[in-house]
Image: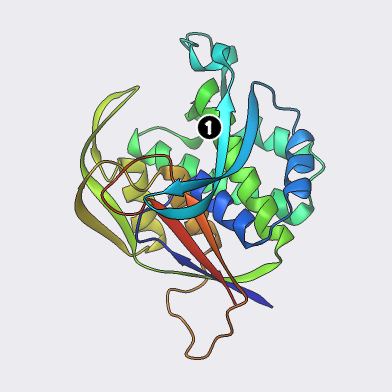
Amino acid sequence: MNSLYVECYSGISGDMIVAALLDLGASKQVLLKGLESLKVDGYKIEISRVNQNGINACDFNVVLNDDIVNSTNTLIESERNIFDIFKIIESSLITDNAKKLSKKIFEIKASAEASAHETSIEEVYFHEKGAVDSIIDIVSAAICLDNLEINEVIVSQINDGSGYLKCRRGIIPVPVPAVVNIVEEYNLDLKVTEINGEMVTPTGAAIIAAIRTSDILPKELSCKKTGLGAGKRSYPNEGILRMYLF
């Protein structure tokens, strides 16, 4: 049995999770083959090593095409709801376990967004930019977790920032409402720090909520490997997600 300890002192996001799992040894080839089977266009994947505040870490980057980035998203065809995304996942060639986990994560995220905006889960639409980014991050995390045969996930206290964030709907507080809803629903240990900005994304919170089995480390553990995943934003702390494989 493989146990995973996730140390969230610098927050958590989907790309940080995937990067740390790749750094732990998840197969890049299995990941890319699985993503290709989704038949989702409009992006490319860049996996590299970066120096993040003096620490060498793995970086997982979803680079969206210009037509998606510049889209005004005025047409309903440019948006997908959770059931559209489920169809994409189900028609892919990833393992049944990865499909099940991917759908569970998306359901957690969509439910949190629905609650934040006082609507139903069916009416939560991911606009094209957010849909592609979320699909790739979430499915990638599920593929990597499945590939590493993780059976137990222990999660530390999760640090987030504070202040305000500009989004499509206007100015919202940090932690953002969807993250707060996930924290409350799944009893995550969230600490709000004085760092200005969003350190915990809804995707990151949803993945952790879906996979966490405990927040207490056993007294005796044998550490196999450490994985470091880099974040994209610059904060006074390291901007690194650290994972330990036991």
Q: Is residue 159 left or right of residue 113?
A: left
Can I make out residue 127 in this image? Answer: no
For mark 1, give the secondary structure: helix
Q: Position of residue 91 (x, y in %)?
A: 79, 36
Q: Residues within 10 Å of mark 1 (few under 14, many from 20)?
A: few
Residue 85: quadrant of the picture: top right
Q: Is residue 134 above or below residue 138?
A: above
Residue 204 in the image: state x and y as whole percent: 46, 49
Left or right placement of residue 90 versus residue 239 in this view? right
Q: Which residue is mark 1?
A: 122
Pinpoint residue 174: horizontal percent, then vertical percent.
25, 42
Q: Residue furthest right?
A: 93
* Residue at 49%, 57% in the rendered image: 208
Looking at the rendered image, the quarter that the N terminus falls into is: bottom right
Identify which residue is drawn at 71% across, 52% down. Answer: 98
Q: Quadrant of residue 87?
A: top right
The residue shown at (51%, 53%) is 57
Expressed as whole percent of the image width and height from the top left, the position of residue 36 reads 77, 34
Residue 229 appears in the figure: yes
Q: Could you tell me how many numbered marks the image carries?
A: 1
Q: Residue at x 49, y 36 (%)?
A: 121
- Quarter of the C terminus within the rendering: bottom right
Q: Amino acid at mark 1?
A: Glu
Q: Is residue 4 left or right of residue 94?
A: left
* Figure check: 13 above or below 2: above
Q: How is the image coloured?
A: rainbow
- Name the one closer to the observer, 133 or 66: 66
Of all residues, the one furthest to the bottom in this rendering is 220
